[in-house]
Image (cartoon, rainbow, N blue to C red):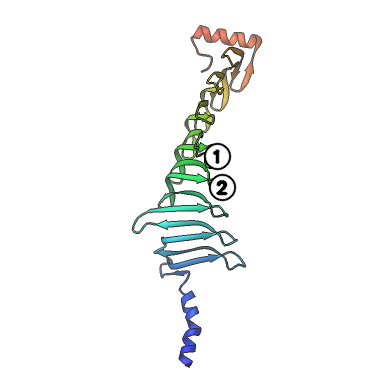
């Protein structure tokens, strides 16, 4: 009886003594867990083998609600992540490669609407990022695209488009290393061009023209590296461009 009591007394210590262990090489091995300061709530619970996460990891909010679940594929650098809002609605989901975000990730609102889908490589946005209108998704089953942008290493780079609900083009343009670059066009809901402006490395450069609902030009302004030029300065500039065969928008 005394031996049994001793075993029962030592059993919790033996069990918990195996948590958060490192081997002789300093590598994490076995079950690991971490609590919030002065709390019994876990920040995370998971398993390591030779300092690498294996199996399923669970992360928690201070309230105790699940914050994230990461499933590590056996004998593979691939893992899958599922993140949650504190109301238990899925926040985002996607894949990892060597613990870095990879491939397509989807994001959701606390109410369950799809907010965006984005492509990753090496934990950075690389490829398309599509943003969706949340209006009408749940009530009407709609999934309207708000914008489509392109990224390189998490920096805007390449074609950009915005849409009205329903799919009609609202705005088109291009980014170069994070800056607006080249011609940008804006349309009204009827598809009529209402604005045209050129950019150079993020600054208005060249003609900026506005049009009415009939597509008739109502104004134009000349920019040079973000500064408006007008009057005699504009006349001299346009004459110089004409003589040298230069496009004022370049």
Image quadrant assignment for residue 237: top right
Which of pointers 1 and 2 lies earlier in the amino acid sequence?
2
User: Going by the picture, which residue comes out furthest to the right?
Assistant: 231
Q: Is residue 88 above or below residue 9?
A: above
- Measuring from the top left, give residue 131's x and y in whole percent: 51, 37
- Measuring from the top left, give residue 182's x and y in whole percent: 50, 23
Q: Which mark is residue 134?
A: 1
Q: Is residue 220 above or below residue 138?
A: above
Q: Is residue 10 above or below residue 82?
A: below
Q: Which mark is residue 111?
A: 2
Neighbor class of circle 1 (other Cα within 10 Å; few <14, some 14-19, many 20+) is many
Left-right relation of 101 to 37: left
Identified at 53% across, 42% down, the residue is: 138
- Measuring from the top left, give residue 70's x and y in whole percent: 45, 56
Q: Which mark is residue 146?
A: none
Element class at badge 2:
loop
Identified at 50% across, 52% down, the residue is: 83
Image quadrant assignment for residue 41: bottom right
Query: Do callouts 1 and 2 mark residues in contact (Cβ within 8 Å)?
Result: yes
- Measuring from the top left, give residue 146's x and y in whole percent: 53, 33
User: Going by the picture, which residue comes out furthest to the left?
Assistant: 75
**Distance CA(mark 1)–CA(mark 2):** 10 Å
């Amino acid at each position: 009886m005394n031996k049994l009591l001793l075993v029962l007394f030592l059993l919790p210590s033996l069990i918990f003594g195996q948590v958060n262990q490192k081997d002789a090489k300093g590598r994490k091995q076995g079950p690991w867990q971490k609590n919030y300061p002065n709390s019994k709530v876990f920040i995370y619970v998971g398993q390591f083998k030779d300092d690498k996460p294996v199996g399923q990891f669970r992360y928690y909010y201070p309230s105790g609600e699940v914050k994230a679940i990461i499933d590590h594929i056996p004998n593979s650098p691939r893992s899958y992540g599922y993140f949650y809002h504190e109301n238990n609605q899925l926040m985002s989901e996607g894949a990892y490669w060597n613990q870095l975000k990879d491939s397509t990730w989807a994001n959701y609102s606390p109410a369950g609407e799809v907010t965006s889908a984005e492509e990753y490589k090496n934990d950075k946005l690389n490829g398309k990022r599509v943003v969706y209108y949340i209006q009408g998704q749940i009530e009407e089953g709609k999934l309207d695209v708000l914008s489509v942008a392109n990224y390189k290493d998490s920096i805007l780079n390449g074609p950009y488009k915005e849409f009205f609900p329903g799919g009609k083009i609202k705005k088109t343009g291009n980014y170069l290393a994070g800056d607006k670059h080249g011609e940008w066009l804006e349309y009204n809901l009827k598809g009529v061009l209402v604005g045209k402006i050129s950019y150079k490395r993020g600054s208005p450069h060249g003609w900026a023209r506005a049009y009415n609902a009939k597509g008739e030009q109502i104004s134009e302004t000349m920019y040079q590296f973000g500064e408006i030029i007008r009057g005699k300065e504009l006349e001299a500039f346009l004459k110089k461009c004409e003589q040298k065969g230069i496009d004022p928008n370049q």
